Amino acid sequence: MLDELEKMISGIIRAAGTETLDMENYHWFRLEDGDIIGFPREQLNERELALLHYLGSPITVPRGSSRDTDWYNLLHGIKDTNNFIADPLYANGCRFIFFHIDGYIDADVFREAMDSLSDHPLACVWYNRQSGILIESRQKEPISYEKVVDMVMYDLSVSLRLFVSPWLASAEDAPAQYTWLHAAYKQMPLHSAKHVLHFHDSIPQLVSTLLPNTDRNYIVQHILQGIDTDEELLRTIHMYFSCNQNLTLTAKKLFIHRNSLHYRLEKLTERTGLDIRKFQDAFALYFAIQNM
């Protein structure tokens, strides 16, 4: 791959590590084989830069820090990271924030926007030009991504999807947990109605992936009992769950009287035998509509 790139772009250089990268004059990428390659900024047009984001992971290392590289090495088991695991920043644990960007944005601009959300540094490892992972250390005031995602999207003029993992006890737990959580993240739809999904939001979807398609389809069929063709009733169920099972708010969002909502829920019970106001029945319905 590198031979082909050198035919297209002149002045490409290699680096052994990220400690002394010239970030002012070069765009740096880690290719699939692990090579760290620098491309002269003045030589690249937007089309070439976009292509490089697809071919490799951009390296955005804050000056004087190798935290991004340490995390890359830790998560991929590349070299000994015992000193990094003992970093006091992660003494109380950490969590992963998997991200996907709909649209193009410079990696440094994205990094600056996310760093502004906390007084403590975030680590960032890119997968490609649109997706990657942030690592947040556990502090007294963690970032509330639901509160800031709209602001970030407005400032950057892109659509952003975040998948937030549970807190991990320590950085030492991270490699094993990362492999499993990354697999869970890849099961999530990129075009969810929510811009921020937490791990617990994904449980019904994850459970369904463990089932053969035939079993999953039978379960959905037996739970819904044919209401999957009733658009009004399905819309009511979706709204009820999105309003955290609050009847008053659900009726308000649907622009109907509360009594009309009760009538629809009674109709749901008649057709399915399930009472959505009971936990077990609500979970079954939620599972089913998430897997239609």
Image (cartoon, rainbow, N blue to C red):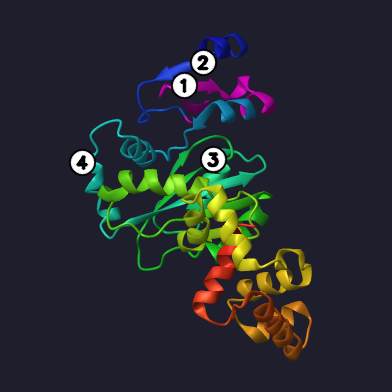
Q: Quadrant of the C terminus?
A: bottom right
Could you tell me which secondary element the residue under label 4 belongs to?
A: helix
Q: Residue at x 59, y 69 (%)?
A: 285
Name the front one of labels 2 and 4.
4
Alpha carbon separation for disc pair 3 and 2: 20 Å
- Find out whether residue 27 is within the magenta segment: yes
Classify mark 3: residues with Cα within 10 Å, few (<14), some (14-19) or many (20+): some
The reply to whether discs 4 and 1 touch (Cβ–Cβ < 8 Å) is no
Q: Residue furthest bottom?
A: 259
What residue did someone put label 1 on?
Answer: 37
Disc number for residue 108:
3
Amino acid type assigned to the residue bearing label 3 in the image: Asp
Residue range in magenta is 23-49
Residue 61 higher or lower than 157, as above or below: above
Could you tell me residue 263's position as x and y percent?
73, 86
Classify mark 2: residues with Cα within 10 Å, few (<14), some (14-19) or many (20+): some
